[in-house]
Structures are given as C-alpha cells and as structure tokens.
Image (tube, rainbow, N blue to C red):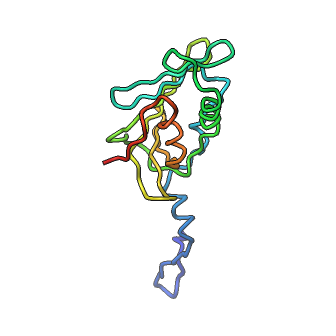
Amino acid sequence: MNQGGRRRGDRFWPAVFVVSSALVDAVLHPLVSRDVLAIAAPDVAQLAIVRGTERHELVSTDGGWTLDGAAAPTDATQALLDRLADLRAIGTTSYGGRIARPIATLEVIRHSADSMMDRLVIGPLEGTADDAWHEVRREGLDVGFRVRASVVDAFLGYPGAVAVVPAP
C-alpha cells in the first residue's frame, strides 16, 4: 500500500508535497461558476430593489420601463439591465450559511409562464478601495459570491433607489 511516502529499510518516511497557494485556495473554496448570478435583460419582466423598508420597482412595459409607476430613465435603466446580464462574481465566500446582516435584496421576476422570481441578497461592504466587495447570495443556491462593490453600487444607486450608504 503506497501512502505517499518512501520506505527506507523497515521505516516509512512521509512525503511532503509543495503546492502553490492558488491551488490550495482553489481546493478550499467552492468550485461553482461565477456567472450564475447573471440574468439576461430580455428575461427580466420586473426588478425590485429592496433596502430596509424601501422598495423600488422597475417594470417592463410595451417598449419601455417604468420605475415606481413613472417612466424610467432610459440610459440608466439600460445600463442597469446590462449590469444584471453581465453580473459576475470575483470569487466565492463559502458553501452553506447565510448573510447575517443583509443590506439589500434584488427581486427579479422573469418573463416566463410561471413568472419565476430570482432573489439576490446583498451583504454589507467588505474590504476597502479597489478590493471592496459585497457577499451576494442567490436564493436556492447554497453558496455565497464575492461581487465587486462598484457592481453592487450600480444597483443600489440606480435613479430613484435608496442612496448607497456604507455599512456600519
């Protein structure tokens, strides 16, 4: 039976393997696609941005969008939908668990027979400057994702939505 070491006489000497820290990180963190949070713009029938007791709804209408019942700003809305379609995590946090202090939730209702809803829960800001990120969890998936703060800010700062406030 080979135990990964070498035998010298009647004694067994354990082997030592040297690997890069990147390989160790890859093994220790969940191996899941970082694109799983993305939702294509044509699939979106409604997008709600919920922060505390405030809720702002972006709704698809014939040829346009409304924000809380009024016409939505075209360029900002298209930029937001593009962000949602390109939503890509920079990594994962962990399997299991949940966000203890969520700061916001994105609720996306899709154009489909069953009006399927995707719920993305956003955690507080972690890190600083260019390394800042939020944990984002998609309901139904048992894994957390690290998403750049600039990406999350695009949703939280969308016109008419609650202004971005740093976590305490």
- Percent of width and height locating residue 111: 62, 17
- Percent of width and height locating residue 63: 69, 15
Residue 168 lies left or right of residue 145; in this view the side is left
Q: Residue at image x 54%, y 72%?
A: 4
- In the image, residue 121 sits, relative to residue 125, either above or below, namely above
- Percent of width and height locating residue 131: 49, 58
- In the image, residue 76 sits, relative to residue 144, either above or below, namely above
**Toward the viewer: 141 or 52?**
52
Residue 110 lies left or right of residue 165; in this view the side is right
**Toward the viewer: 102 or 78?**
78
**Toward the viewer: 68 or 105?**
68
Q: Quadrant of residue 110?
A: top right
Residue 157 lies left or right of residue 100; in this view the side is right
Residue 80 lies left or right of residue 156; in this view the side is right
- Percent of width and height locating residue 18: 55, 76
Q: Residue at image x 61%, y 41%?
A: 35
**Toward the viewer: 119 or 77?**
77
Q: Residue at image x 60%, y 17%?
A: 60
Q: Can you say which quadrant of the picture contains the N terminus?
A: bottom right
Furthest-bottom residue in this view: 9
